[in-house]
Amino acid sequence: MIKPLRRRHLQIWSLLAVLLPAAILTAWLVVPQPATDLLLQPETAAPLPLLLGQNDKPERTVSLRAVADSSMLQLEWVARSPLTAPSALVYAGPALLGRIGPRGNYRFSFRPSPGSRRPQIILYDIIHHTVIEKINF
């Protein structure tokens, strides 16, 4: 090697000795944090104090709760196993309460209709347009 080539070689290796660790450190700092598993269902409200009725099956428990004067009702759905229908909606009489998905606790608050005290709960599959289950309390 001639002298100018040796000088250029030293300059390049000196530059690489500084830039390579800086590039590794920068790459390590910009790595995103691993994603955590988050539930897609919203936070559930606290259960109302008075239990009006309960319907148990091995795969789920459905409870109807109320406040002391029965001005507000709450449907509590505890799913122990996922539903076979991926798109199940819950109705209390004619009113849509919400959607039931995978395992978990679901609570839906609603006001009772003026004519009836205990609503009929209907689980409806919107993809197949079928009623999956009717629950009477």
Image (spheres, helix red, strand yellow):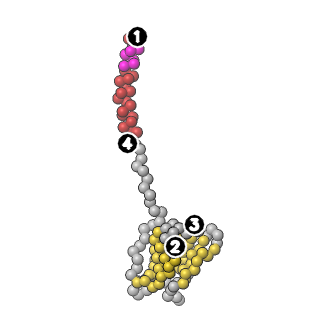
Of 37 and 12, the residue lying toward us = 37
Magenta stretch: give its range: 4-10
Q: Residue at x 40, y 49 (%)?
A: 33
* Residue occupied by mark 2: 59
* Residue 116 visible in the displayed image: yes
* Residue occupied by mark 1: 2
Q: How many residues crowd mark 1 within 10 Å: few (<14), some (14–19), many (20+)?
A: few
Among numbered discs 1 and 4, the one appearing first in the sequence: 1
User: In the drawing, does residue 78 fall left or right of residue 49?
Assistant: right
The amino acid pointed to by label 1 is: Ile
Q: Is residue 36 above or below residue 109?
A: above
Q: Nearer the viewer, mark 4 or mark 2?
A: 2
The CA span between labels 1 and 4 is 41 Å
Q: Position of residue 105 (x, y in %)?
A: 45, 71
Q: Given the current orientation, which residue lies at the most extreme front position?
A: 58
Q: Position of residue 8 (x, y in %)?
A: 39, 17
Q: Position of residue 11 (x, y in %)?
A: 37, 21
Q: Residue at x 57, y 66 (%)?
A: 86
Among numbered discs 4 and 2, the one appearing first in the sequence: 4
On residue 86, which mark appears? 3
Q: Residue at x 49, y 76 (%)?
A: 61
The amino acid pointed to by label 4 is: Leu
Q: Position of residue 19 (x, y in %)?
A: 37, 30
The CA span between labels 3 and 1 is 74 Å
Q: What kind of element bears circle 1?
A: loop
Of 63 and 58, the residue lying toward us = 58
Q: What kind of element bears circle 2?
A: loop
The amino acid pointed to by label 3 is: Pro
Callouts 1 and 4 close, C-beta under 8 Å: no
